[in-house]
Image (spheres, rainbow, N blue to C red):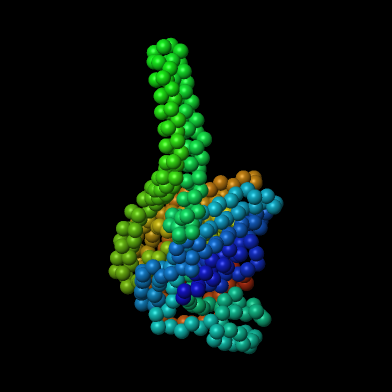
Amino acid sequence: MGNIIQKFLEELSDALSTERKLTSCDREMQIYTDIQKERLMKKGLVLDYDFTGRGLNPEGREQGWEARDEHYFAKMWSSSNLYKRILKKNGKVINKKKQNVSVWALVINYINGQNMEDEVYVCPNCGNPEKIKALTEGCPYCGTSFKMDELYPKVTGYNLVYDPSKDKKEMIKFYIITSAIAAAAMLIGLPVIITGAAVLIGIVLAILKVISSETAGQLMLGGISLAVQSICAAPFVGLIFSSGILVAKLLIEGAKSAPLLATFSTHKMFEEELKKYGVDFMPQYFMGQTVAKVKSAIFSENPEELPFYEGGQLPEEMKDIVDIFFRGAIEFKSVEVKDDVAYVNANIYTEVLSEKNGKAKENQRIFNINMKKNLSKKNSLDFAISKFMCPSCGTSFNAYKHKKCPACDNAYKMEDADWVIESIS
């Protein structure tokens, strides 16, 4: 699974600004990326990501964390990158960001399953033989849609964290720059101030005959000596200065992230409640799926048409949101089960980028959501693929992207198979 993170970042760098498709991530992430791209196009915007390996972990590695449930196992990976984001409108840059980050991504695979993507499946509608991975968007010949389990391994969620670490080359470059700034300040500013003050004080005191001319000369020489000493100390001051910058950045980022740490204690409460009903819960997987659904709903012009959203139209100001970054934390506020249906209220911590009238702004935001799921419906352990058919009229349609059958207008009941969102605020 080692190369999947690099492949994912390469695809993500092009996914919103070119026709390149995401293939290394799960279905939910692919769907919200397509919907986000539609919003950008409608607003006349181009959003371009770029991830370049850097620092101590450019290739990515496992972090020693692993989780398992009855069906899957998950591993957390991280990769050190220089992250760049540019937002353009009508060819003009209206927002840009550049930051050293660690990309934390969750990769999920089967426990005892077989990767079926290269297996051949015959379309039951037209008889065309095709590899299963080519059927995720429907049969390329007749358009028949299919219901199938995810083709793992896949990236199922990711978030970015500020990365202060530097490799040897970066540290030397950083030290040279900060030392040069400190040295320049001391060479130009401090010697001038010290020498000028000493000379001026010496002259004034000599004129007023408070001190003798010899003493005034000694005072001036003392000032010059201090100036020379400050110049010699410049490299050491530069080292202190560069260290101070790193510490300050760590403190600032730590203060920003501190409120997120308290949210993880709520995951245990959620997990214990679901286990009462024999439902497996993998926190990181749930977070990735939930964030993907929220992004799809917010980016969609008509979220009520999505199969996993049962709320009404979202606030008008959410139509200005063009990018959302998950900050890696969900706080579960409450969990209640009635008649085998679980109702959950939670806060999702994010950073959002909004655009209105050609002006862009970025800010942290907490989205509150209400969700539900029928806990009596169990997941299958084995990979399965079947023709996606409307239970009312038998028409094949993509129920991952559309709630209602295009032929008879009846809605597919998603809560029997997955979590659905009732509201976002």
Q: Is residue 17 left or right of residue 222?
A: right
- Displayed quadrant of residue 357: top right
What residue is rendered at 40% in x and 57% in y? 329
- 193, above or below 383, in the image: above
| In the image, farthest residue toward the front | 214
Q: Is residue 360 left or right of residue 151?
A: right
Front-most of residues 80 and 265: 80
- Displayed quadrant of residue 336: bottom left
Q: Position of residue 323 (x, y in %)?
A: 55, 55
Instruction: Report if residue 217 is visible in the image.
Output: yes
Q: Position of residue 211 (x, y in %)?
A: 39, 15
Q: Position of residue 253 (x, y in %)?
A: 42, 50
- Figure disc tally: 0
What residue is rendered at 59% in x and 79% in y? 134
Front-most of residues 193 and 17: 193
Front-most of residues 355 and 135: 355
Q: Is residue 197 left or right of residue 126?
A: left
Instruction: Report if residue 389 is visible in the image.
Output: no
| In the image, farthest residue toward the top | 208
| In the image, farthest residue toward the right | 90
- 66, above or below 369, in the image: below
Front-most of residues 256 and 405: 256
Q: Position of residue 363 (x, y in %)?
A: 50, 47
What residue is rendered at 58% in x and 84% in y? 131
What residue is rendered at 54% in x and 66% in y? 9
